[in-house]
């Protein structure tokens, strides 16, 4: 069904060290305007508050590395919106296998990277705290099945690797990502004007710098998954085309794409800064 990794973890409360790190990250205001991170904190740390009776958490990953890319857009957003693609596959998987519970793709209070690590499918990298899947690197989407069924076996976390290069960006701190200083957050989630001091690099939607800086990025390889490939029209866009982007073009270029999260006005704001 297109998944590159699958692991099983017992649905227990998130370990103390991870929970404390998360609470500290919130206390430092590193979540910026993402107020949804402040809501349902207990639910995020205790899976049975989200799905009563949950016994097993299955972590799944899909490779999103496109075969070719539009350089102005972050790697993960070149094709169709992963929320829709993955949710549809996961629902199908649950139906085919007679699984009971719920599935989530980045839209519920779930510690996704923690569960991916806990269920043995990947390691958490130092640069940006990505999950890296052996053989596929950090260019993966994650999804979780919260099942009320017990498994006869559970997976163990992979050994931690401390071979990272460390922080490559001032937004990356020992206490986690400070979203207020992160280009990815500012160009995707943030509404309103961009900070005057912000300079954009190669991309005006998202930022792949820390993703590319992880040593495990060398393991990333292009996927054959059609849903995550960019369209011909997107590939052909030039800086001048971006400057002239109309709302109609925007709607057709990004139909069914995660880029719509920034809205037309947000994208025009980003493009204006990018071309400066
Ligand atoms: S996405 Fe870009 S701006 Fe954000 S932490 Fe990574 S390198 Fe820094």
Image: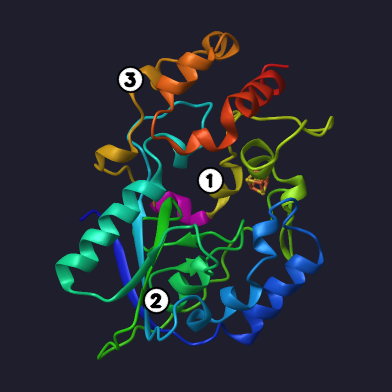
Q: From the viewer's perspective, is residue 244 above or below residue 59? A: above
Q: Which residue is painted at 41% across and 29% down in the image?
A: 69
* Pointer 1 residue: 212
What residue occupies the far front of the structure in this picture? 52
Label pair 2/1, CB-CB below 8 angstroms? no
* Pointer 3 residue: 232
Among the two numbered marks 3 and 1 on one chain, the one whose residue lies closer to the N terminus: 1
Q: Secondary structure at mark 3?
A: helix
Q: Per the image, is 218 magenta?
A: yes
Which segment did they paint magenta? 215-219
Cα gap from disc 3 to disc 2, whole angstroms:
37 Å
Q: Residues within 10 Å of mark 3 (few under 14, many from 20)?
A: few
Q: Is mark 3 within 8 Å of ligand 1?
A: no
Q: Which mark is residue 120?
A: 2
Q: Position of residue 180 (x, y in %)?
A: 77, 48
Among the two numbered marks 3 and 2 on one chain, the one whose residue lies closer to the N terminus: 2
């Amino acid at each position: 069904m297109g998944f590159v990794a699958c692991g099983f973890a017992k649905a227990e409360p998130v370990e103390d060290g991870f929970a404390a790190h998360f609470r500290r990250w919130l206390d430092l205001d590193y979540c910026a305007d993402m107020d949804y991170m402040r809501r349902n904190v207990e639910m995020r740390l205790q899976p049975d508050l989200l799905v009563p009776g949950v016994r097993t958490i299955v972590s799944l990953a899909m490779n999103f590395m496109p075969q070719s890319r539009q350089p102005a857009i972050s790697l993960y957003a070149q094709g169709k919106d992963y929320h829709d693609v993955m949710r549809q596959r996961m629902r199908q998987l649950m139906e085919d296998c007679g699984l009971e519970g719920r599935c989530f793709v980045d839209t519920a209070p779930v510690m996704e990277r923690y569960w991916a690590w806990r269920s043995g499918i990947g390691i958490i990298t130092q640069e940006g705290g990505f999950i890296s899947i052996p053989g596929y690197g950090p260019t993966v989407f994650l999804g979780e099945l919260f099942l009320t069924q017990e498994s006869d076996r559970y997976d163990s976390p992979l050994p931690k690797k401390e071979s990272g290069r460390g922080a490559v960006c001032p937004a990356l701190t020992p206490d986690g990502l400070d979203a207020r200083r992160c280009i990815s957050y500012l160009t995707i989630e943030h509404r309103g004007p961009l900070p005057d001091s912000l300079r954009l690099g190669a991309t005006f939607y998202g930022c792949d710098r820390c993703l590319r800086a992880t040593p495990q990025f060398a393991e990333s390889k292009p996927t054959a998954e059609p849903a995550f490939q960019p369209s011909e029209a997107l590939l052909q866009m030039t800086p001048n085309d971006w400057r002239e982007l109309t709302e109609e073009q925007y709607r057709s270029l990004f139909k069914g794409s995660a880029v719509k999260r920034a809205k037309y006005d947000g994208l025009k704001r980003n493009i204006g800064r990018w071309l400066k």
